[in-house]
Amino acid sequence: MTPRTAPPATHPAVSPDASWDDLVAAALLGTERRTPPVTPRPGQDAAAALLDAAALSTVRRRAGLRPAPARPAPAPAPADPRPALPPAARSRLTMLLADRSAPGRGSPRSAPDLAELLPQWLALANHHGYRAPDALLPALLDAARARTDLRPEALTLGGPRALWLARLNGEWKFALRGGAGRATLPPEDTGPAAGPGGDGRSDTQRLWEEGLFAERVSLLAAARHHDPAAGLALLSGTWATERAEDRLMFLDSLRDDLSPSDEPFLEQALADRSRNVRATAAELLSALPGSALAARMAGRTRGCVSLTGAGRIAVEAPGACDSAMQRDGIVTKPPSGRGERSWWLGQLVEATPLDRWTEWFGGLDAAAIVALPVADGWQADLHAAWCRAAVRQRSAEWSRALLGAPALPPSPGDAAPAAWRDPARLLSALPPEERAGWVAEFIASHGLSDAFRLLGVCAVPWAEPLGRAVVDALDIARDAGSYPWSFSGVMGLAERCLDPGQADRLEVLTAIPDEDEDTAPGAGGYWSEAFQRLVGTLRLRETIRAELTPPGP
């Protein structure tokens, strides 16, 4: 028998000392800069030999893998005893999550924007106490991942099964950090002593000490909502070891459930190493009219502002900002273009309890005090500081006085310029009905040009006078020949905020109006499409409301 000769090599020879990392490094750097650890076949260049060697090594690596042990199956999903959605509402949710007819996807401009209706649908479904269908939980979590504004309502609808599912997919980890919050933390598990584990710490304490920052912020907000003292105890326990930026965020989270019992902790925070933390602590203390800081600020303000015998307000701004003022949160350096003394005065006045002015000015109410003349050109500074104080202390009386009558614009030397540049903040301190009435009168007198932010602070659905004022102003703009896209922001708000019962009354506005010489070309057709979309959206909202309403007894 004659021995057979070895067949010619069909692949390049790889150096026995070469590793996968060596091949990858040669590929990344290029064969001109690094010689690959392979021997090419006759007639083969180095690059082709490197690719062949990588393919061979890949097969070898895959063939050498050993099966991994099976992972334990996840625990069963928790039960959700809430009622299921009605069939029509479930179909509607499927459509809203798919967003099949949103603008920009082939739908006409007059079709409703389903993506803008999803937040209202979620809020209404949660109002009735429904749970999300299991099959739609992945789509619901994907929607919440893409839109942060949906997360609170989406996670409430998803309930414990959404959180169970989020633990199995890293793309939904947001639900475990910032989204669960108040809706998922039970009242009995908000204190450091709740549910002790094997190391003597409760689950809450362990999460607070070891969790991610977003998880800790959510936990603190939930704890403060259910038991403010227990939440403050969590924060106090680790306050000294927190980073300055984290202390600032934690401190700001105390704002919603602030109470006089927080004063000792906030007083200690006035000595914090961080200037921003000190300033935030001072702001929170000034929102407590009975705090010691508010009393100290009032004492300083009393020496700067007084009522003369002639019925005028005299102002003597502070001449210096001493260390005690700085400790109480007064920022020494003013912004560009602002004088030091007016800057210090404004900070003192905005931190002074508003009821002190009635005491100092002989029992006058807020409206009478705001109407008093102010000497030496200090009126704008004083009124602007009162506006900030009214918002901070949530005073409806002072907000009402500073806003004035909505039908009349402020005269140059009369009302506070800051209030009229941003009246939305003052409106937020008024009751919802009064807020809507004020904005309705403002729109009737001044139109929609400056009303967008005002509409944003009004309760939804808009009260009938406000809705009527908005529609009338849009009708006037259409008759004037204005372009409809100039009012696209207000029109979008109207689609989401008008009472759906107004749809039939608005049907007449969907007709294309006659155009004259002063009308912008094509504006009539665009207005018709805009009103068609408005009417269609209102009717769809009415249908959604009917679909989600539980059947009667």
Image (cartoon, helix red, strand yellow):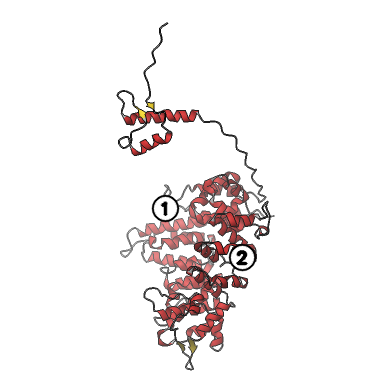
Q: Residue at x 41, y 75 (%)?
A: 334
Quarter of the picture holding the C terminus = bottom right
Quarter of the picture holding the N terminus = top left
Question: Of the numbered discs in the image, which one, if any, rests on residue 471?
Answer: none
Q: Residue furthest top?
A: 1
Q: Indicate left or right for 271 with 129 as reference.
A: left
Residue holding disc 1: 109
The x, y position of residue 298, in whole percent, is 53, 82
Quadrant of the image occupied by residue 315: bottom left
The x, y position of residue 316, in whole percent, is 44, 86
Question: Mark 1 falls on what kind of element?
Answer: loop
Residue 121, visible in the rendered structure = no
Q: Nearer the viewer, residue 530 or 335?
A: 335
Q: Nearer the viewer, residue 426 or 96?
A: 426
Residue type (three-letter) at the residue carrying disc 1: Arg
- Using the image, determine if residue 79 lies above or below residue 243: above
Q: Residue furthest right?
A: 553
Quadrant of the image occupied by residue 513: bottom left
Q: Residue at x 43, y 61 (%)?
A: 489
Q: Residue at x 59, y 61 (%)?
A: 220
Query: Of discs 1 and 2, which sits in the foreground?
Result: 2
Task: Kindly check if marks 1 and 2 are in contact, taking CB atoms under 8 A apart as contact.
Answer: no
Label 1 and label 2: CA atoms lie apart by 51 Å
Q: Nearer the viewer, residue 495 or 34?
A: 34
Residue holding disc 2: 232
Q: Residue at x 48, y 30 (%)?
A: 62
Give neighbour class at mark 1: few <14, some 14-19, many 20+ (Cα, 10 Å): some
The x, y position of residue 79, in whole percent, is 66, 47
Residue type (three-letter) at the residue carrying disc 2: Leu
Q: Indicate left or right for 157 with 478 as reference.
A: right
